Amino acid sequence: MGSLISVSSNIQELRMSRLELLCLLCLILQCPLSCLSNSEGDALSAFRGRLSDPNNVMQSWDPTLVNPCTWLRVSCDSNDNVVLRIDLGNSGLSGTLGPELAQLPSLQHLHLFGNKLSGNIPQELGSLKNLISMDLSKNKLEGNIPKSFANLKSLKSLWLDNNELSGTIPSAVVTLLKHLVVFNVSNNHFSNPPIDVTAQSFSMQCFENKKFRGARMKEVVA
């Protein structure tokens, strides 16, 4: 009798193990989208933590939600719930940019123009390979244009005008120009010449129909 009870107990334990395994498998299959949403929410919360928001435009950015797709100024893909757009132009924000935005792999549009953002542009933004437009104009950003921007092969529009950028435009970034419709870096403090002289692929044709303007650049685009 004891052996029968033992066998019955083992069978029950085996059934429970299979049930637990099935539940675990379901969690694993559901994890990619939910985990990505959580990681994107964490990234945006970290980004918000760097900023001063006197107008409370980011008040709806609640880090306790499963994903950030219900937040104002954030747009997502309706199917996958991944972040596609951040629209925070003319919002009165101040603070610095950090590497957290690079944790939004599906991001296509990053619009932060007309604020008071300062500090350097993070190299990590060059990993946003799905980015189509980036507008960081009319801020107080300084330092160099990151060389990593050469990796933004999907980029069509880049506004960096009216900042405090300096140095030269890296030769690696010059190769990006053939893909761009808009490239505006006017009203900064680039050295003369503004283009890295090691850029072998640079040609005047690169700037046809491009908004590449500003003092100290006229001799380059004339």
Image (spheres, grey):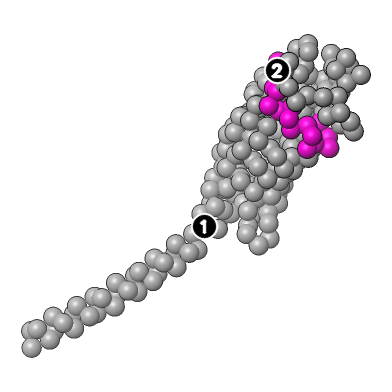
Extreme residue in the right direction:
222
15 relative to 64, above or below: below
Q: Is residue 51 left or right of residue 168?
A: left
154 relative to 27, above or below: above
Q: Is residue 71 left or right of residue 11?
A: right
> What label sits on residue 86 in the rendered view?
none
Q: Is residue 177 left or right of residue 18?
A: right
Viewer-proximal residue among 94 and 161? 161
Q: In which quadrant of the rendered view does residue 212 lie?
A: top right
Q: What residue sits 63% from the left and 57% below the top?
A: 81
Across and down, in percent, residue 196 comes to 72, 17
Viewer-proximal residue among 114 and 53? 114
Q: In which quadrant of the rendered view does residue 165 lie?
A: top right
Q: What residue sits 61% from the left and 46% below the top?
A: 105
> What label sits on residue 32 in the rendered view?
1
Label 1 crowd bin: few (<14), some (14–19), many (20+), radius 10 Å? few
Identity of the amino acid at label 1? Pro
Extreme residue in the left direction:
2
Q: What residue sits 22% from the left and 80% below the top?
A: 11
> What label sits on residue 198 in the rendered view?
2
In space, the residues marked 1 and 2 are separated at their CA atoms by 43 Å
Viewer-proximal residue among 77 and 52? 77
Viewer-proximal residue among 202 and 60? 202
Which residues fall within the magenta stretch?
167-183
Identity of the amino acid at label 2? Thr
